[in-house]
Amino acid sequence: NAGVTQTPKFQVLKTGQSMTLQCAQDMNHNSMYWYRQDPGMGLRLIYYSASEGTTDKGEVPNGYNVSRLNKREFSLRLESAAPSQTSVYFCASRKSHWGQATDTQYFGPGTRLTVL
Amino acid sequence: SQQGEEDPQALSIQEGENATMNCSYKTSINNLQWYRQNSGRGLVHLILIRSNEREKHSGRLRVTLDTSKKSSSLLITASRAADTASYFCATALNAGNMLTFGGGTRLMVKP
């Protein structure tokens, strides 16, 4: 199993450009998450999807949109990138099937985004 | 605002020594988790302790939880150079709820 994969690994954008960060998991997990990590700080939740077909805002959703394409994939879109969105973005997933739920999250390797 | 705050922010020790990191949080929780992040990598789950537990062990890791003080500590015994990483605590208000991460402790273990 590859676990949680993210593409791309690195990206440089100009202010105002748009892009989509891709995330996929092969662990049959119901819940998926997008976080951002700024230098020297912990992770902050942008959006999450408790199950296929649902998405909810986290702590810092402004400037982002998400799509839970299917059970495996959860994408994060920046419609008009701003320098304040320069960060490392992590996707995570969690097993949350009824009766088999755990609280552990599994993280991807991250996407390093720079907005000029 | 971050629920958990780690202390110290940075810690440098010699190989073989023990490393202790602390986490304080603000509201009642269901569980608290510790994660490790190697430089340039994603987070890896280390250990989870529930609000009705006081201490858990996993290999060289020992976690304590004091709900009256709203604090937790992570002890790494007999540290190795490979333990060099950032360590984050994360709290869940309810089972299966969102995690809120602290700012992390950067641990350096010198060979």
Image (cartoon, coloured by chain):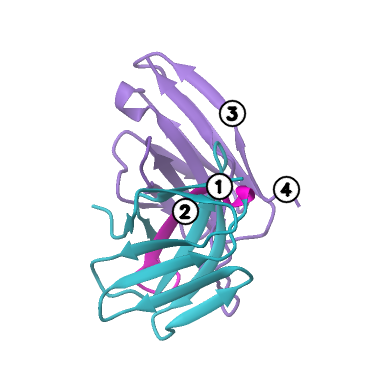
Q: CA distance from mark 4 to mark 1?
A: 25 Å
- Residue closer to the observer: B24 or B42: B24
Callout 3 crowding tier (Cα within 10 Å): few <14, some 14–19, many ≥20: some
Q: Nearer the viewer, mark 2 or mark 3?
A: 2
- Name the secondary structure under disc 3: loop
Callout 1 crowding tier (Cα within 10 Å): few <14, some 14–19, many ≥20: many
Q: Chain of mark 4?
A: A
What residue lies at 43% left-to-right and 52% top-to-bottom? A48
Letter of the purple chain:
A
Residue that label 2 marks: B87
The dot on residue B84 is 1
Specify the colour of chain B: cyan
Within the image, what quadrant is residue B73 found in? Answer: bottom left
> Residue A42 at what x, y percent from top left?
38, 47
- Name the secondary structure under disc 4: loop
Residue that label 4 marks: A2
* Between discs 4 and 3, the one toward the N terminus: 4
